Amino acid sequence: SLTIGIVGLPNVGKSTLFNALTKNDVLAANYPFATIEPNVGVVGVPDPRLDTLAEIFSSQRKLPATVDFVDIAGIVRGASEGEGLGNKFLANIRESDAICQVIRAFQDENVVHVDGKVSPKDDIETINTELILADLQSIEKALPRLTKESRLQKDKVHVVAAAEAAQKILEEGRTLFSAGITRNTEQGQLLHELHLLTTKPFLYVFNVDEDELVDESFKDAQRALVAPAEAIFLNAKIESELIELSDDEALELLQSMGQEEPGLATLARVGFETLGLQTYLTAGPKESRAWTIKKGATAPEAAGVIHTDFQKGFIKAEVISFDDLVATGSVADARAAGKARMEGKDYVMQDGDVVEFRFNV
Ligand code: GDP
């Protein structure tokens, strides 16, 4: 499954946040015998639709979609100089599908800042600089080979051009993601074989003091720093306290801080979105469940997420949109109202589809 790597300077609250993420581990709760790497936190994506479905179908349990966060501990500064630890650090980022930077914005005299002062802008620049330098090295190393290959393989001409264009952007101190070059774009695809870091989608967690959680002008200023990436504001210490509380107590604490949901919930939702993922829903007396697919997945591909045999033997999918199901009250009523659609193998799944697959075994 796709993973989000968590990076940041020392003492910004990464461990505090990651511990909260792992305690919130839905995998541990739902699959007690699953083995999980110690540096991976599997977090449920909050989805109130599952509560509704579980009520309609009297489901015994609810299984949300999940996002995997990987704690990429280690050095940031000097990583691109490629000494042992730096290499390992960059290799771990290379394996992630998205990069989540934790940025310190909280003030606390007892917690030393590695650069002596709290400055989100400088911290973001420090981290991005290492990633940019690493990408520049990858490109510089590959260009002579690519240029040579392009003399015989005409399609490589486009790769060379894309690499040179990327080099220019990086030399200006910009990440490729911020310049709109991601793995989903044509340019990004051409660069695929270079395994660059800054074409991955970015997302930023600002670890802020309680006051700043509701300080809209402060938050807007940070958002502007990281656009087009998403910014999430939370207090890692409070998050680690929230998970120890009962639902009611947690809600009360959140409301006292003017928050609608825990920061971890927002992080899971935005992280899921950043990875380019989407869900569809299944429901029955055993469970109501959200399944993870890539945006744009077809019905057979969606069926394959449940079981490869479902994809191989796919006949059709009976699809009812969540809203129609809720409005009519049951599958039978939705069918009677003409709201149940039979979709074939070319159907592109839509968010909120409640599905039952028909297949040959
Ligand atoms: P890491 O080095 O980035 O993993 O940072 P840690 O999670 O170990 O946190 C470093 C120190 O900052 C610890 O003493 C934490 O208790 C403290 N800390 C983490 N988050 C917050 C926060 O939101 N507010 C305050 N005041 N301290 C925090």
Image (cartoon, helix red, strand yellow):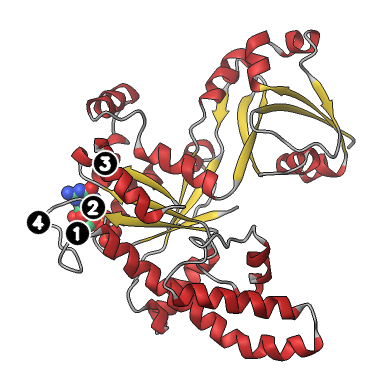
Circle 4 or circle 2, nearest the eye: 2
Looking at the image, is mark 2 or mark 1 earlier in the sequence? 2
Residue flagged by tag 2: what amino acid is it? Ala
Residue flagged by tag 3: what amino acid is it? Ser
Q: Which residue is mark 4?
A: 109
Left of 298 or right of it: where is 278?
Answer: left
Identify the image quadrant of the C terminus. Answer: top right
Circle 1 or circle 3, nearest the eye: 3
Residue 329 point in image, percent of width and height: 65, 9
Q: Which residue is mark 1?
A: 118
| Other-residue count near label 2 (Cα within 10 Å), few / some / many at <14 / 14–19 / ≥20 | many
Res 115 → quadrant: bottom left
- Image mark for residue 217: 3
Residue 224 point in image, percent of width and height: 36, 51
Residue at x-position 59% and y-position 48% = 276
Circle 3 or circle 2, nearest the eye: 3
Residue 63 point in image, percent of width and height: 56, 32
Q: Which residue is mark 2?
A: 105
